[in-house]
Image (spheres, rainbow, N blue to C red):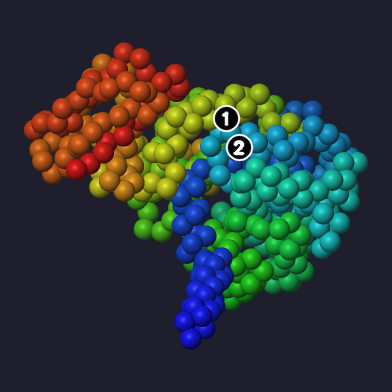
Amino acid sequence: MMRQLNTQNVILILFLLVSKAVFAQNDPNKSLKEWQDAKFGMFVHWGLYSVAAGDWNGKPSRGNEHFMLYERVPLKEYAKLADRFNPVQFDADEWVKRAKDAGMKYVVFTSKHHDGYAMYDSKTSDYNIVKTTAFKRDPIKELAAACKKHGLKLGIYYSLGRDWEDPDVPTDWPTKGGRSNTWDFPDEDSKDFSKYFERKVKPQVKELLTQYGPIAVMWFDTPEGHITKAQSTELRQMIKTLQPDCIINNRIGNNVGDYNVYEQKIAVKRDALPWESCITMSGKWSYNRHDKAWKSSELMIRQLTEIVSKGGNLLLNVSPNGEGALLTESKERLDDIGKWMKVNQEAVYGTHPWIVNSESISFEKTAEAQDKAGKNTMQDTDNDNTSKEIHPDICYTAKNNVVYLFARSWKSEDLIANSFAGSKFTVKKVDLLGSSKSIKWMQDEQGLRINMPDKLPETVPVYVFKLTMN
């Protein structure tokens, strides 16, 4: 009898464990939480526009990756860029390894941008890198293998509401036809988004979700207002059926996404929904030989810490050239960020905003102004609205009974954190991440006073103090 009960118990326990594993695997909240805990990813803009590299007809072009629109380049002429596209320097393993070494946890790759050109082996459309170039390789297949090897998640960008190769894609921004291919397909009134949706969007999204293994994120762009609530819902249901663990950004349209996107700006305050800022390293999204507006490593780490202190993720963009190589400027900055992350990663991953976001800081005011500026412009390229200010300030994250204090760009010998004035928050211990030295500190009615040690970690000057609370 005892043996029978033990056997039944074992079977029950195994059943519960299997059920729990299956539920966890298909639990969208679990996937979203894992993504939020990851905090940091790499965005990759790469396509035919990378071959043009910021020039057209022998002079600098307007619009960068949108230059087909800005220069009104006929489709047949634009497509000839594929004759020059043989990116033999493309190395998916190097891209992903560099992302991992920088502390990034996921990669989002442009499978199809607004030009309609597929950067993978699409069976739906021959207008793709495998069919039209001498390269004849599938970058997403190689990126999927590299992500699996290095333990990163793979996300896919897909331009939903703009496609300049397809005759049935209308737009209404900033005016009717304002972002449509009206030089090849001039009759805007005859364009039927539903035909494009059925003929190209659904089949290609299905390809992307069935050809490459697990896809962690479907990152849509430009819903443009022509996709209906029913279509957004249908697309979401298809994604969740094919890949239950895949999360979806809000640009699927009609408020059916899992998280919000802030493009080239940072949320002014904590967002009620999960959110992500996508931000460029330089002034452009894609490779442009004329682009010299590179952010410093310190500025980008400041942006990361500001975003994380408000509960968001940072999707930091790189722009490989037409040969498929990451730029030296990108690699140098990724290396700097990686060195900083190795020291301070526990203050980033899996953290949440503390009761106080920041102090001695102007980024909320600056961000509000930048946010307002972003809403009042019609730019969809060169649209960086992030602050470029660098000055000493403090921001916070938290985890369990620990508060992490980021002393950003700190240059003075002493630090006073006024948020700890009085006895409302009582500090038990103070450590400096990356240092084994004992930290001198005291807490009084003025706040938490920390003596900055003579020897600081040899990283970008954003120092993290670990405050163990009572």
Outermost residue toward the bottom in this view: 1
Looking at the image, can residue 346 be seen?
yes
Disc 1 is placed on an element classified as helix
Return the residue nearer the eye: 208 or 200: 208
Image quadrant in which you'd find residue 229: bottom right
* Residue 254 vertical placement versus 340 (above, below): below
Image quadrant in which you'd find residue 408: top left
Q: Are marks 1 and 2 in contact (CB under 8 Å)?
A: yes
Disc 2: which residue:
99
Q: Residue at x 49, y 31 (%)?
A: 342
**Circle number at residue 324:** none
* Residue 81 vertical placement versus 236 (above, below): above
Q: Position of residue 109 (x, y in %)?
A: 66, 47
Return the residue nearer the eye: 208 or 11: 11
Q: CA distance from mark 1 to mark 2?
A: 7 Å
**Circle number at residue 334:** 1
Outermost residue toward the top in this view: 454
Q: Decide: few, some or many residues near mark 1? Use Cα within 10 Å; few <14, some 14-19, many ≥20.
A: many
Q: Quadrant of the C terminus?
A: top left
Q: Is residue 412 left or right of residue 434?
A: left
Q: Position of residue 261 (x, y in %)?
A: 49, 52
Q: Residue at x 45, y 22 (%)?
A: 459
Q: Is residue 448 left or right of residue 218?
A: left
Q: Residue at x 57, y 26 (%)?
A: 335
Looking at the image, can residue 253 be seen?
no
Q: Residue at x 21, y 31 (%)?
A: 417
Return the residue nearer the eye: 3 or 122: 3
